[in-house]
Image: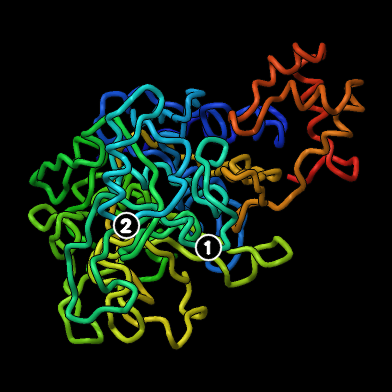
């Protein structure tokens, strides 16, 4: 019997830098430095969600210990942490996937057909081989550490401040090829899949949306499944191994975590509940129904409220906590992300988002309303193991940046959204006074936020102070006290 991976001493929480300073220091790798050389050997390495906090059904909780309820959630397993390079030419390179992205969204929205032309005509960073990303490519830059917008805005710029939510919808190259007899108005017309920076969803829609172009690694998002003949499937593209069969019954999120931790399929005992990026990696957008390769995977068949053959939602280990107006997570406002292998139906049984869509749902039946589809109050499990993943029982609170300010392309700013802190940004005037420099000199040394996180070592040298002195000064909040972590 294979043993569980040994706990790593270089887990998510190994950094000794002050909490707020880490948010400023990171220039390429999110949270603490947990890296793996193995992803360079893969064509489809999965980028970690970067979720560092743990939650029960209704609120944030201390990291549960092994054998306790809710152990095994996203924060307690860490894979290839996000790592980006700002090329200073309007492009961003993802060091994990090998993809290069346009830093900015298109300045205007486009129809789906025009979106591809926009990318083909784009000349940026000295390249002219830009393309419209697939849904799996665009999903790779999702960041679940902190809530909306679901990208790292140190690197990826948005359009507007969210008043027009279409501004947070980005086209993918994948059409919605599975058409239900019963359709919600939202999915009617000629829908294609979008990724939503506002809600984090993957869903099929029509109309005009924005575009973020990509280039490089044309193999990314293409699975390479092998049936191992022992009820497991290996994806050689991602390095992940999957259970061939689902668990066969709808269960709660808490039960799903426990089921995965206790599983011994094919004599392996290091199975886990997949995070939402791992889970979405096996979705099939080629037009098959269900949206999963049925030559490899067995799926439980269901009947929905329209008496149609349908297929499950699958639980992920990833949470989505929603903040109230006071910045705290409201009791009952903690959801879990799920993948729809079948129709993503509304309460009337009409397909709302398309097979292969990704949404979040309440973890507990107590927080469903009468308008929530009964078929998805409990969901199914697809086990995963392997990959460049380390068990990190304590999670990593440093993934949350309490000073996060979202900068938009047009110069507007806004605080980050649900799931993260709403603490103040550093008080630069107080920091400058502490360092004995002018505020203007401090801001010049730190550089423009548009250029990504500052090089603190270089900034300190410019100011004639030590890096530790600069870090300590930037810990000062607006009331002169260190911000709460």
Visible residue check, residue 247: no
Residue 44 placement (x, y as % from top left): 27, 36
Element type at marker 2? loop
Residue 236 placement (x, y as % from top left): 19, 35
Query: Between residues 179 and 465, which one lies in front from this camera angle?
Result: 179
Q: Is residue 417 left or right of residue 236?
A: right
Query: Between residues 312 and 269, which one lies in front from this camera angle?
Result: 312
* Residue 111 - label: 2
**How much space separates mark 2 and mark 1, taking CA atoms?**
16 Å
Q: Residue at x 23, y 68 (%)?
A: 342
Q: Residue at x 32, y 78 (%)?
A: 185
Q: Quadrant of residue 389?
A: top left
Residue tagged 1: 164
Q: Is residue 316 left or right of residue 462?
A: left
Residue 174 placement (x, y as % from top left): 24, 53
Q: Residue at x 22, y 46 (%)?
A: 267
Q: Is residue 480 left or right of residue 199?
A: right
- Mark 2 or 1: in front is 2
Q: Residue at x 60, y 55 (%)?
A: 161
Picture quarter with the C terminus: top right
Q: Quadrant of residue 141?
A: top left
């Amino acid at each position: 019997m294979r043993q569980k991976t040994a706990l790593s001493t270089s887990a998510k929480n190994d950094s000794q830098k002050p909490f707020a300073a880490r948010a400023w220091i990171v220039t390429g790798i999110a949270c603490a430095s947990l890296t793996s050389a193995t992803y360079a050997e893969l064509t489809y390495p999965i980028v970690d969600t970067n979720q560092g906090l743990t939650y029960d059904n209704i609120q944030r909780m201390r990291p549960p210990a092994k054998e306790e309820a809710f152990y095994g959630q996203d924060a307690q397993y860490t894979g290839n942490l996000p790592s980006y390079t700002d090329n200073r030419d309007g492009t961003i390179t993802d060091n994990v996937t090998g993809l290069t992205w346009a830093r900015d969204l298109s300045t205007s929205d486009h129809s789906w057909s025009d979106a591809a032309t926009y990318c083909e005509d784009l000349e940026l960073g000295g390249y002219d081989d830009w393309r419209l990303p697939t849904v799996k490519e665009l999903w790779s830059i999702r960041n679940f550490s902190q809530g909306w917008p679901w990208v790292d805005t140190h690197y990826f710029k948005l359009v507007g401040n969210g008043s027009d939510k279409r501004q947070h919808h980005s086209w993918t190259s994948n059409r919605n090829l599975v058409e239900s007899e019963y359709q919600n108005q939202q999915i009617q017309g000629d829908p294609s899949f979008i990724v939503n920076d506002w809600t984090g969803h993957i869903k099929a829609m029509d109309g005009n949306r924005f575009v973020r172009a990509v280039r490089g690694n044309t193999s990314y998002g293409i699975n390479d499944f092998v049936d191992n003949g022992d009820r497991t499937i290996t994806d050689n593209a991602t390095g992940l191994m999957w259970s061939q069969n689902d668990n066969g019954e709808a269960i709660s999120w808490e039960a799903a975590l426990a089921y995965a931790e206790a599983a011994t399929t094919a004599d392996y005992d290091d199975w886990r509940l997949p995070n939402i990026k791992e889970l979405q990696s096996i979705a099939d957008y080629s037009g098959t129904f269900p949206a999963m390769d049925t030559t490899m995977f067995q799926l439980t068949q269901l009947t929905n409220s329209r008496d149609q053959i349908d297929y499950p939602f699958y639980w992920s280990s990833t949470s989505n906590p929603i903040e109230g107006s006071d910045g705290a997570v409201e009791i009952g406002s903690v959801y879990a992300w799920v993948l729809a292998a079948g129709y993503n139906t509304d309460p009337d049984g009409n397909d709302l988002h398309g097979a292969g869509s990704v949404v979040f749902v309440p973890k507990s039946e107590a927080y469903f309303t009468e308008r929530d589809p009964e078929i998805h109050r409990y969901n199914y499990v697809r086990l995963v193991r392997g990959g460049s993943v380390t068990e990190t029982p304590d999670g990593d609170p440093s993934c949350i940046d309490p000073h996060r300010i979202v900068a938009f392309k047009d110069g507007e700013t806004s605080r980050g959204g649900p799931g993260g802190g709403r603490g103040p940004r550093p008080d630069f005037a107080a920091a400058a006074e502490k360092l004995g420099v002018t505020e203007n000199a401090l801001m010049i040394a730190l550089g423009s936020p548009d250029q990504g996180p500052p090089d603190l070592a270089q900034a300190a040298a410019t100011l004639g102070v030590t890096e530790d002195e600069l870090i300590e000064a930037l810990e000062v909040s607006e009331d002169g006290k260190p911000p709460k972590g």
